[in-house]
Image: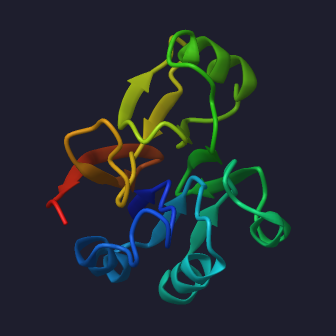
Amino acid sequence: MRLLLVSDTHLPKRAKVLPRQLLDELPRADVVVHAGDWVDTATLDLLESRSRRLVAVYGNNDGQELRARLPEVAYAELGGLRLGVVHETGAAQGREARCAARFPDLDVLVFGHSHIPWDSTTATGLRLLNPGSPTDRRRQPHCTYLTATVAAGGLTEVELHRLPAR
C-alpha cells in the first residue's frame, strides 16, 4: 500500500496551486494523509476528489469550515499498521516522549505545523513523521512531502521528496 504524506499546504496564501510533482503522486497513492493547515476548502475538495482514501485533520490556521469537516486527530488502520494524524505536537525537544505518552496504541504518527521534515522513532517504537510543506519551505532549503509503503503491518520505503524552487 502506497502512502502520500503532506502537510501545511497553506493555499492560496503560500502558493496558488499545489506543485505538479505532488499532484502527479495522487493517482499512485492508495492513501493520502494530510496533517493540517489547508487554509482553503478548495484544496480539501481537490484531495477528496482525487484520492482513493484521504486521512486528514485540521490545523491551527484552518477556519470553521475546515474544522467542521475534519477532526483534530485522525486514526486509520492500514494493512495492520496503526496510523494517527495530528497537526501540532509541540516543541522538538521532548517530542518523542510526549507523543509516545499521548499515542501509546499507534505505530506511526504523522504531524505537521513546523514545516520541518522529521523522521524519528520513540523508545516505545512509535515512528514520528513530518512531511514538511510542499508550498512553504520557511527556513528549510526545499519544499517537501513524503511517500511510504505499508507492507506486512509495517512502514517501509519512507522517502522525503524535495520540490524544485518555484
Task: State left or right for residue 131 relative to residue 111.
Answer: left
Quadrant for the C terminus, please. Answer: bottom left
Q: Nearer the viewer, residue 161 or 107?
A: 161
Q: Quadrant of the N terminus?
A: bottom left
The residue that appears at 22% across and 47% down in the rendered structure is 142
In the displayed structure, 10 sits above or below 53; it is above
Rendered view: 113 above or below 25: above
The x, y position of residue 145, in whole percent, is 33, 54
| Residue drawn at 58 percent across, 64 percent down | 38
Q: Is residue 124 above or below residue 151?
A: above
Q: Position of residue 100 (x, y in %)?
A: 64, 20
**Most extreme residue toward the left, as rendered?**
164
Number of disc labels: 0
Frontmost residue, 133 versus 33: 133
Point out residue 19 in the picture as x, y percentages from the top left corner.
Answer: 29, 73
Q: Is residue 120 above or below residue 144?
A: above
Q: Report whether 9 appears left or right of 103.
A: left
Is residue 166 visible to us here? yes
**Residue 1 in view, yes or no:** no
Question: Is residue 145 left or right of 32 when viewed as pictured?
Answer: left
What residue is rendered at 40% in x and 77% in y? Answer: 16
Extreme residue in the front direction: 13
Residue pictured at 52% horizontal, 79% vertical: 47
Residue 98 % position (x, y): 66, 16
Identify the colour scheme used.
rainbow
The single residue placed furthest to the bottom in the displayed view is: 49
**Res 39 → quadrant:** bottom right
